[in-house]
Amino acid sequence: MSEERPQNESDEFEEIVEAETDRDPDLAVIEAGSRTLRAQSGPPQGDGIPSRPADPEVDRALREVEGELAKRWPETKLDPSLVRIESLMDILGSPQRAYPSIHITGTNGKTSTARMVESLLGAFDLRTGRYTSPHVQSITERISLDGAPISAERFIETYQDIQPYIEMVDAQQEHRLSFFEVLTAMAYAAFADAPVDIAVVEVGMGGSWDATNVVDAGVAVIMPISLDHTDRLGTTPEQIATEKAGIVKQDATVVLAQQPVEAASVVLKRAVEVDATVAREGLEFGVLSREVAVGGQLLTLRGLGGEYPDVFLPLHGAHQAHNAAMALAAVEAFFGVGSQHARTLDIDTIRSAFASVTSPGRMEVVRRSPTVVLDAAHNPAGARAAAEAVTESFDFSRLVGVVGTSADKDVRGLLEAFEPIFAEVVVTRNSSHRSMDPDELAAIAVEVFGPDRVQVEPRLDDALEEAITLAEEEGEYAGAGVLVTGSVITVGEARLLLGRG
């Protein structure tokens, strides 16, 4: 690499490599597509990615909590039961019922949409709590108050406050509470303690049996559904949609992204069963127009109450425009637009909120000369959206890919989505035990790209250095770039290596 890493960044990365990582990279971006459309506290600051605590005692205490959580079932292990989390919520006094919620599920786009919803609500002077997963670099990212991750001190305090009750439930149940169940309880407790005006909650996996589904959200947001986690959620869009539609509660409003027909039918049937109102992307709301702008895109959105022109979104890709439409409709539904009254929300507030949105690890530029872009796409739908976005937003003369994936993903489908835009690909791995062996990944890559376009670098730092060297071969002004992708863990570790941690 042309720039030498400071010693502390190198040490921090080595710590990540040595740590056990059980995160499930259920992050990415949604497939792009065109739609035609019609209707019936403050925004986050910075990128929201905290570093390790500077105080050695706080850092030690945080590592102890992380160690305790790591001993539990990983979030990749799904048990179709809410018994444990419901027991814990009962003992805690049902903190999740102390505030209204917007609940978000779907295959791709959940975290970006949650961050947009949070920014919009904050711009209207509501105190927000946001719970998302997995994290890019720090576990404290998962629980946010007022648009920023809770401090390490507050994270530790929240865990210590509910730890005795966790142990009570552990003693009563056949299986101990899982990693994700404990974190979910911490989030709901922290939100009640704040207290927040509204919680924005991202489903971990699925819907019906997800630990987050102890909330009775008045607004249920269902992002595009595609095949992912098929070993746990089902092998068809209908099966996966059935699981995700479980977040739709009695008399709620469903904000529904464009879906495969079979998936949409499942959600609409569920809505009828529980008397929920449905707002559909492409019918009641959506993206009227979009154009690429410096640093993002300029949108005209159709909301439930009318049009919102000249909305600047500092994120790249058609998929992010559709995420914005979903977020706007969700916030309108929360305020009763389209049901109790028909009017747009204040346009200047909407514009200000969207202009402040960040989404780390999603088409994120972390370096120039050559340009290095990070994107957490980890399934074929996300990869196709990322490929379209990078082609549209960056005028690269040549693009080198750095890919590190999890072994349980549709790796071939992901690589095939990137094949048309990568001149060369450097395959690697991240620190997770779930990461695919680089040689196995290379074997698939050779079948997709051919042997002359594939290189193998088992260490991520070496892979980044090799990709940047390949990009620099064209010369400083030639316009080559690097895209790092395949997993949120790969992206998070690359962020550290490139000095963004």
Image: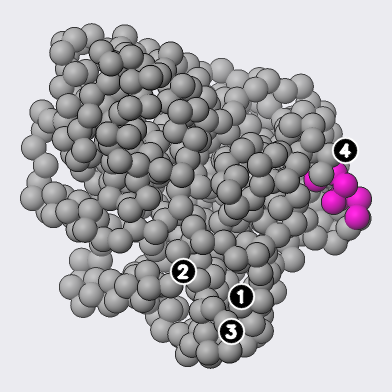
Q: Secondary structure at mark 2?
A: loop
Q: Which residues are magenta?
A: 267-273
- State the image coordinates of residue 318 (x, y, percent, origin top left): 57, 25
Q: Residues within 10 Å of mark 2 (few under 14, many from 20)?
A: some
Asked if the residues shown at circle 3 and circle 2 are in contact, with their CB atoms under 8 angstroms apart, the answer is no
Q: Are marks 4 and 3 in contact (CB under 8 Å)?
A: no
Mark 1 residue type: Ile
Q: Nearer the viewer, mark 1 or mark 3?
A: 3
The answer to whether residue 270 is visible is yes
**Residue named by callout 2:** 73
Vertical placement of residue 209 versus 401, above or below:
below
Asked if residue 106 lies left or right of residue 457, the reply is right
Disc 2 marks which amino acid?
Trp
Q: Which residue lies under the disc numbered 4?
A: 40
In the displayed structure, does residue 489 sit left or right of residue 409? left
Within 10 Å of disc 3 (Cα), the crowding (few <14, some 14-19, many 20+) is: few
Q: Nearer the viewer, residue 151 or 259?
A: 259
86 magenta-colored: no
Quarter-of-image position of residue 358: top left
Specify the principal SS of the magenta part.
helix
- Image quarter for residue 390? top left
Query: Label 2, label 4: how many angstroms apart (C-alpha)?
Result: 44 Å
> For the residues carrying marks 4 and 3, which lies nearer the camera in this image?
3
Foreground tag (4 vs 1):
1
Q: Give the residue number, with chain letter if any, for mark 3.
A: 173
Element type at marker 4?
Answer: loop
10 Å crowding of disc 4: few (<14), some (14-19), many (20+): some
Mark 2 and mark 4 lie on one chain; the one further toward the N terminus is 4
Tell me which numbered mark, 3 or 2, is placed earlier along the sequence.
2
Counting from the top left corner in percent of width and height, residue 20 is at 30, 61
Name the residue that disc number 1 marks: 85
